[in-house]
Amino acid sequence: MSGPDRYDKIIELCRRRGLFYPSFEVYGGVSGLIDYGPLGARIKVNLLNEWRRFFVDSSPDLVYETESPLVTPENVLEASGHLSSFTDPVTTCTSCSRTFRADHVLEESGLLGESMTMRELDEAYSKGVVCPVCGGKLGKPAVFNLLFKTSIGPYASSAGYIRPETAQGMFTMFRRAYEAVREKPVFGLAQIGRVGRNEVSPRQGPIRLREFTQMEIEMFFDPEDPSAGVPSTYEDETLRLQVAGSSETVSLTAKEALEKGLVGSPWLAHYLAAGKRFVEGLGVEPSEQYFLQVPPGKLPHYSKETWDQMVRVERWGWVEVAGYSYRGDFDLVNHARHSKSDFTVYKQLREPVKLVRKVVRWDAGKIRRLFGAKTGQVIAKLKNLTEEEINEFSKKGVLEIEGLTLGPEAISLSEEEYEERGRRYVPHVVEPSFGADRLMYAMIDHAYTVREDRVVLMIPRRLAYPSVGVLPLMAKDGLDVFARQALLKISHAGFTVTYDEEGAIGRRYARLDEVGVPVAVTVDYTSLEDGTVTLRDRDSWRQVRVSSDKLTHSLDRFIHGGEDLESLGEPLNKEG
Amino acid sequence: MSGPDRYDKIIELCRRRGLFYPSFEVYGGVSGLIDYGPLGARIKVNLLNEWRRFFVDSSPDLVYETESPLVTPENVLEASGHLSSFTDPVTTCTSCSRTFRADHVLEESGLLGESMTMRELDEAYSKGVVCPVCGGKLGKPAVFNLLFKTSIGPYASSAGYIRPETAQGMFTMFRRAYEAVREKPVFGLAQIGRVGRNEVSPRQGPIRLREFTQMEIEMFFDPEDPSAGVPSTYEDETLRLQVAGSSETVSLTAKEALEKGLVGSPWLAHYLAAGKRFVEGLGVEPSEQYFLQVPPGKLPHYSKETWDQMVRVERWGWVEVAGYSYRGDFDLVNHARHSKSDFTVYKQLREPVKLVRKVVRWDAGKIRRLFGAKTGQVIAKLKNLTEEEINEFSKKGVLEIEGLTLGPEAISLSEEEYEERGRRYVPHVVEPSFGADRLMYAMIDHAYTVREDRVVLMIPRRLAYPSVGVLPLMAKDGLDVFARQALLKISHAGFTVTYDEEGAIGRRYARLDEVGVPVAVTVDYTSLEDGTVTLRDRDSWRQVRVSSDKLTHSLDRFIHGGEDLESLGEPLNKEG
């Protein structure tokens, strides 16, 4: 199943059979951009739909899909912190003028560049680092913003950017969405969409892209009641966690990880476990994945706690396919401040709470004598003292008002009971964020299998494209007519399907196996006699004979139901 | 069903219930950008999936989905003509400095600005046009490019743009895709994806957007055999066509339109008819749509023939929801030239053709005497004469080679028979291109119905979201438990579903009707006795009682099968 050049073989297969390849290849390509071709785009669509089913549709009245634009005005990304913090360190060669990721150059010399702060990079570069291309001296590291910049409308002054994450569209629509879901205290917004990150010099083929598809959920909840509404579905799922600072993973259930405080929020623990199961469903065994906690110094600017879901792929080793962050109230608070809008929600307390507060009382006669015409103004001020001012008075015993110092002769402090019936708060956010393209690659990497010197792409059946191949044993004697009728029936039943009558049947099976078509329907001379066809399993190469009346039902059980081929009909002896 | 302010009511409904609303609204919004909210995004996903089923999956081995990036390097859009031709005329007020679409300002004064050439606009403006905002004098119209510009990577010199159409990604990947589909002479590439058009001052809410979702097919075929592979599926479909220059529509079948030469290509006729049926499937009656031919002077730069599919919406009148263009070989030829790549395909002729060509023969001795050491060079040249040079010689009787004039004494013309077995050609392209967001709005506009003073959004059942509402008559006595179990079962069966137990049952039905949930499952006291539930049809408000064993099967027949409610169970008398 493995070998030193599996990556090259996969890339070759994907180009040749049209799964994916570099974009704009005839123009020499643009690094970090890939196309999905005739046989790959639809597999990606299946992957997106699988995510939608798993994370959105299966959580009715809890998680809702949304869509917002890529083009984002500057003030949004200023508020979100991306304008100042969404950066990579770069260095330019003083000799050949090429620009590189300053941290990656160090990584290539065996140093831990990626985990260095800007100051540490500066120090490393001050000792002299040579250009990996021309050997010249690399310059002092600088900060490069990864946002694709553009302008909106005919005025060059209206700066806009391609969004670096779908998340901000969900935060800015929070108020509208909150009202649309009838002010649920716990709900999630989800989005599947493209984002852009203007990487300095992306390599690693489909792994590091300048434009890719994110699948994100922003789960909003009351920070005072963080476990409300969290389903117990995955609490017994075992997670492999590598805590920041540790060099080893520990295995424990989501529930245990939460109870022991390794994971800081119930929603975070829930989504780690759900994410593990989802990725497992793409064909990546639990032993091939773990969660790596991001150390405090390397956390994204918005995050209090982040776990990266790591998946092993042959060429690149452990690769991040998803990130799970506790974003707290960072985004909503910042958008509230920058947009001067209200992002709080109101919650009624289960029982009103009796509380005591300090209030300032005054001697109206004294005040009038002291302030004369200004009395009304001063009393208004006394009525609206801030908590801070009242505390100040409580500490010092005097209060400055309109240039005069008032002491106990004019004002006094007393305590007052009051009832709190509700409270306003800014929801906190837990965010699972998946990279669809990395998942797609990881799925293919794990599906790539060599059997008897032939490639079989063992993509999970329901994610493969097409789902079914229809093959007449010969393209004559009416076998082709029978097969084309079967194709129509299969297509009308909603399956994706392909027809192939060219070449020997063994070669045709091989062509289907190579791109992962899970089942082949073969029409032979017996079909003409009794109306049966054979089904051939891509993975086992075994065949059974089923009645064509039950064909679409059998295909449904095999592809969506995940049933064994043998449960569908009479086994045949031949393999092929 | 209509009224002067239906648009405002729809917009209000969509904002309030979370179907769509302006993007970045808390920051004052950006015109031309909209968000789809918790109840709208999923309807749009259903629309995209419907298109995919209709145009891609139902054409196995003919139309293939692809995906390519939005970020596009400059050379691609230079080759495609967008850099020079994808423009709108603008005018800036000499007094208040506001910028407007020069043609739209004239439209608002009742002139036909949109159909004017740049010269005609110049002339109109030279007579003086006043600013619609401040009344100042508007300046001379200028050309504004609608591409969102950015730069790729850390070098500001690598210009890139957000693609204005998905098409270019499919043209640039043509060679790879052609090989992946095993060199089919006829095949289509499809793409569903976002595009950006930096409109000058978009108004018309969801109709004119700066970023939107396109659904496009590029159908490639042999221009010498343009009807090969065209299905007859829609040839008898009646089309309403308004030919360029005419002020009236004619009704005829797709087949007739093609035979009479009104529509210039079989694939074009096929897609016009398919498009009509697709839009009809979204709930837009044939009488509410027609095809308008774009006059020669207003054709897009790449097109030889374009038809706009017009749909009536209440506020904006006839709106274009799709464009059908005969792009010929414009794009492939231009990309071939700019990228210096081969975009031709080879076709074997059914029978080899015997042809005659002129060849130049020479007297080797004469040539040697004339050219001496240069002889080899000259003979190589004579062997590789272009067709043009040979024709030149045939006409003039002499040929200039290396500074000498050769006449019949040294070279002569003769004819040679040869056999042509195959031919290389550049495929031609027919492109249907749909705007998903306009279709979404048109669908809602046509679905918006008022019944007994209540809004019912009669979206086609299979496009609605959620598909099913589950309501316990009362949230007690175990009705809620029964209902929640039904919800789980419905969700597991793959339907989108919502649960509602708050308020009177009539109010809950109304809430579902308003956003178009096609069917409500109600659990009442009889359910507890005999396990039956009621199904209520959104449109007729009628109810039937069905066994909960058959519930998901009944829902499938109603939602996907389009069956009448009455065919599913025992009718109830009450409406509500």
Image (cartoon, coloured by chain):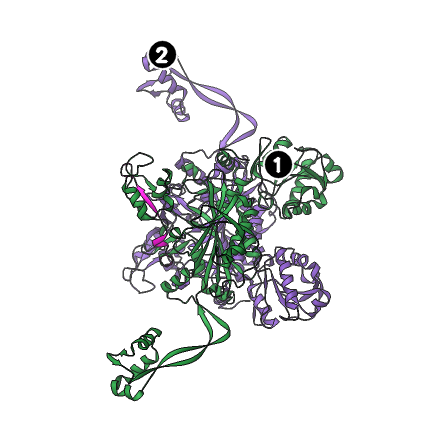
Chain colours: A green, B purple
Instruction: Give the amino acid type for the residue marked by disc 1 in the picture.
Output: Asp
What crowding class fits label 1: few (fewer than 14 Cα within 10 Å), some (14-19), or many (20 or more)?
A: many
Residue B482 position in % (x across, y down): 66, 65
Quarter of the image holding residue B387? top left
Label 2 is found on which chain of the structure? B
Instruction: Give the amino acid type for the residue marked by disc 2 in the picture.
Output: Lys
| Foreground residue among A268 and B464 | A268
Residue B11 position in % (x across, y down): 48, 65
| Foreground residue among B82 and B227 | B82
Label 1 is found on which chain of the structure? A
In the figure, is residue B502 to the left or right of A167? right
User: Helix, strand, or loop for circle 2?
Assistant: helix
Residue drawn at x 33%, y 73% is A388
In the figure, is residue A523 to the left or right of B275? right
Furthest toward the right, the residue is A529
Q: Determine which residue is flagged by label 1.
A: A500
Q: Nearer the viewer, mark 1 or mark 2?
A: 1
In reply to whether residue B354 is colored magenta, the answer given is no
Furthest toward the bottom, the residue is A365
In reply to whether residue A91 is colored magenta, the answer given is yes
> In this rendering, is residue B411 above or below A375?
above
What is the span of residues highlighted in magenta in the rendered image?
A78-96
How far apart marks 1 and 2 lie (CA) works out to 60 Å
Q: Determine which residue is flagged by label 2.
A: B366
